[in-house]
Amino acid sequence: MNIHEYQARNLLEKHNIKFPKGKVGSTPKEIYNIAKSFGGKVMVKAQIHSGGRGKAGGVKICNSPSEAKEFSKKIINTRLITNQTGPEGYLVEKMFVTEITNIKKELYLSLLIDPDSECPVFIASLHGGMDIEKTVESNQANIVKMNCDPLVGIKPYKLKQFVDKLNLPKEGNSQIVSLLNNIYKAFINNDCSLIEINPLVIDDNENLVPLDCKITIDDDALFRNEEILKLRDINQENIMETRAKDYDLAYVKLTGGNVGCMVNGAGLAMATMDITTKSGCYPANFLDVGGSTDKEKIKEAFRILISDQDVKYILINLFAGIAKADLISEGIVEANNELNNELPIIVSMRGTNSESGFEILKNSNLNLYVANNLGTVSKLLLELEKQNDNFIR
Amino acid sequence: MTILLDKNTKVLVQGVGRDGSFQTIKSIEYGTNVVSCVHPNRKDQFFQEKIPFFGSVKEAVEKTGANAGVIYVPAPFAMDAIIEQIDADLDVCVCITEGIPIHDMMMIKNYIKNKKTKLIGPNCPGIISPKLNLKIGIIPGNICNPGNIGVVSRSGTLTYEAIAQISEIGMGQSTCVGIGGDPIHGLSYVDVLKMFEEDPETKAIVLIGEIGGTKEQSAAEYISNNVAKPVIFTIAGSTAPPGKRMGHAGAVINGKMGLASEKILALKKVGAYHAEDLSKIGETIKQIL
């Protein structure tokens, strides 16, 4: 789960990390008042769950409270499109106002879980700021890393080795040690998968100041982080994906396809998308109904597929292991009848109780096409696509 | 021969809720020697009227000689169950549970270093050795055939698909191992490849990978220096958009290395045979064997 910059700052402030003065507002008037209380010249930043805000015009240094007000008027309640949001962008409902910091040098600092070393890893770069991705790709020499053993935490000797490589001024050296310790505590205490400070700057008094931060929390650990769950902003999420999540379904909407896919298992769902694409048709979505699935989940999955206007055919590909194919079939038939669906449904189904599952489907009034294997799925898709073309002509 | 399991394998079960008990019954029907169940509050009861419950893994091991464990408990309690099985020195611990916090897995992976137990999973379908009629986990037994092909995969359902295609072309499996779809998991491709290479009854290996991470690249590196047996592979997720979690916590394209095309390239380079899509695994095996 992602949280907004202002929420991430609050969370880090609770772990004794100091930021420049800042406050969030949701109307131009509020933004004006905050800017005024900060002495006039401020930075105003759109709050969305995406990076690349600066380049997209969502961040601006404003020289007066009225300029801050005008800027926020232009941005609040619009959708900000950045290079990371996709064409729809994200709705800006709040903006964050901060004091101006005089920057002498910009660094990059993050703590994330590295699946290769299977532990938290600090990554720092001597060149932070807006183009950090490019720095990482083009100039590995500027990147400094430190692995942390989760069983013992970070030890001072290791911190020293890490910090020495950063060549900070004297003030910054002692400040970064406590910053790293505090970030690590925040990371462990809140089940974070990422804490990123970019930029981390050295100001003109040689002090180390974090200017922006991003935090991602492990979705699988939200059950034990109730306070963080309260920070969830569902307006930053895709409505259908959110609805799916509530039913414990993994759903991702894809653009440009018309085959509504319903699959059990993430791997098979991906492979089904691949096969659909290879046959010349395109998937409208990724949908994994999960290993341990039940009738209600299947019905909801079916509703999600039907409510997508792009979907012209439904492709159900199941290999039941922990799930039971007969229960899934009952769910499909019930949902199909409830929603009066007439769209053609291609079904490939194997594994636990699949024979009785097929019986249930065959004895229903589904617009059913049975595929015995994945090769047949491609052929059926093409056939249906052809019929559809003929029909339109 | 088989890998990981043999005819002396005695299994204990942690988590006999709806799914856990259904799968335990299926395992017993298949032929697995399930000797005990563990539940803190069901001591002195019996599963299916014959398999005794014990209050702890340690007690189950002492009383029944269990040397392997399977875990179906919900994610919030899975870490405790895994650590308990590691502490009881089981040879093998298979964790089926999905959705374990990644911080827990990080702790477990650092804790398990230098311990006896081999962890398989989590978020995996488990292991099956058709020749011995032995399975731990949820892979359907009726799609398997005893044979000479080893299967290793991050995905449960893709494991089934590969097994089914191997059986459909009249061949069979030596052992199949689902290593799990989480970014941090127990045995890796490399661990399982090593076992298959050393196993005299495995003649060829099917490796099923997917987008995200760099584990397929590590497998490729290992194959180039250590695996002489033919490796057939397919990678799922060529059409997945970057930055989106495709069900599995580990299936997210973050950076170039996570792309299907990069993984395919790495494995082709070391001489592995590419089944261009999932439906072609059987066909590809037939062509080279």
Image (cartoon, rainbow, N blue to C red):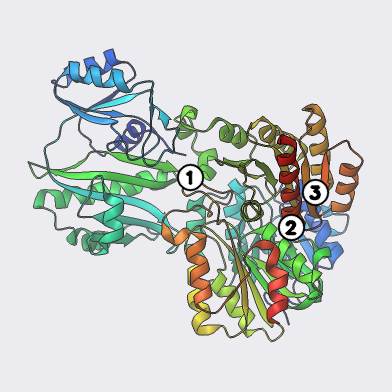
Q: In this view, does A3 lie to the left or right of A250?
A: left
What residue lies at 31% left-to-right and 25% top-to-bottom? A95
Query: Picture coordinates of residue A145 (x, y %)?
Result: 30, 61
Where on the picture, by quarter, is residue A279? Answer: bottom right
Going 59% across and 48% down the picture, which residue do you hit? B247
Q: What element carries label 2?
A: helix
Q: Which of marks 1 and 2 is nearer the N terminus?
A: 1
Res A22 visible? yes
Residue B149 in view (yes/no) = no
Q: Nearer the viewer, mark 1 or mark 2?
A: 2
Q: Mark 1 belongs to which amino acid?
A: Asp
Reply above or below: B177 against B194. Answer: above
Q: Which amino acid does label 3 sit on?
A: Lys
Chain hosting mark 2: A
Q: Nearer the viewer, residue A101 or B263?
A: B263
Is circle 1 on the same chain as circle 2? yes
Q: Disc 3 versus disc 1: distance between alpha carbons?
A: 29 Å
Q: Nearer the viewer, residue A56 or A312?
A: A312
Q: Which residue is tagged 1?
A: A218
Coordinates of residue A288 in the picture (x, y in percent): 65, 46
Q: Is residue A237 above or below residue A64?
A: below
- Please provide percent x and percent y for residue A56: 31, 35
Chain name for mark 3? A
Label 1 to label 2: alpha-carbon separation: 34 Å
Chain letter of disc 1 in the image: A
Disc 3 marks which residue?
A: A324
Q: Are marks 3 and 2 on the same chain?
A: yes
Q: Name the residue under label 2.
A: A374
- Of all residues, the one furthest to the top in this rendering is A29
Image position of B203 (left or right of B35)? left
Image spot of residue B159 (x, y percent):
69, 63
Earlier residue among tags 3 and 2: 3
